[in-house]
Image (spheres, helix red, strand yellow):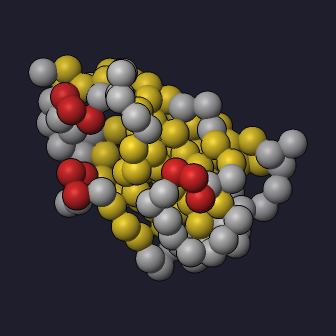
Amino acid sequence: QVQLVESGGGLVETGGSLTLSCAASGRTFIRDAMGWFRQATGKEREFVATIDWGGSTTRYTESVKGRFTISRDNAKNTLYLQMNSLKPEDTAVYYCAARNSIWTSDLRSQYDYWGQGTQVTVSS
């Protein structure tokens, strides 16, 4: 059974930092591109960042560029999202996802596996 389990969410003040982790199990994701998405209350789930299978190519949504960093450790089957300079508008449930392709994607429909999400709340 394939599982993606996020952790690291929580409550942080504006300007603070958090690091999210996503542990994968049930199959190896070494040749899968992976991504982070987020969903604020009452809004659609949106793309945040994506990384290719080897970790050499990354892409970000404009609003997080320069503040968030996506990375992966294939030996540990783990995906990370380092979030700095957090803003109240970053408040959302954050989901990790994996797709059966080595290439990055910012489209939710192109991901095959999803975690259950972790809540990030940024207070003003």
Please identify the quarter of the rendering in which residue 37 is found.
top left
Q: Is residue 16 visible?
A: no
Tell me if residue 42 comes above or below residue 56 in the rendering: above
Q: In the figure, is residue 61 to the left or right of 15?
A: right
Q: 70 or 89: nearer the eye?
A: 89
Residue 64 position, x and y percent, is: 24, 52
How many circles with numbers are drawn on the protein? 0
Q: 77 or 92: nearer the eye?
A: 92
Please identify the quarter of the rendering in which residue 111 is found.
bottom right
In the picture as drawn, the residue positioned furthest to the right comes out as: 1
Q: 59 or 70: nearer the eye?
A: 59
Tell me if residue 53 comes above or below residue 66 in the rendering: below
Q: In the figure, is residue 76 to the left or right of 104?
A: right
Please identify the quarter of the rendering in which residue 78 is found.
bottom right
Q: In the figure, is residue 62 to the left or right of 50?
A: left
Q: Is residue 7 visible?
A: yes
Tell me if residue 68 comes above or below residue 71 in the rendering: above
Residue 118 position, x and y percent, is: 50, 29
Residue at left offset 31%, top offset 46%: 83
Residue at left offset 48%, top offset 57%: 107
Q: 34 or 108: nearer the eye?
A: 108
Residue 60 position, x and y percent, is: 33, 61
Indicate the quadrant containing the C terminus: top left, top right, bottom left or bottom right: top left
Residue 96 position, x and y percent, is: 55, 45
Indicate the quadrant containing the N terminus: top left, top right, bottom left or bottom right: top right
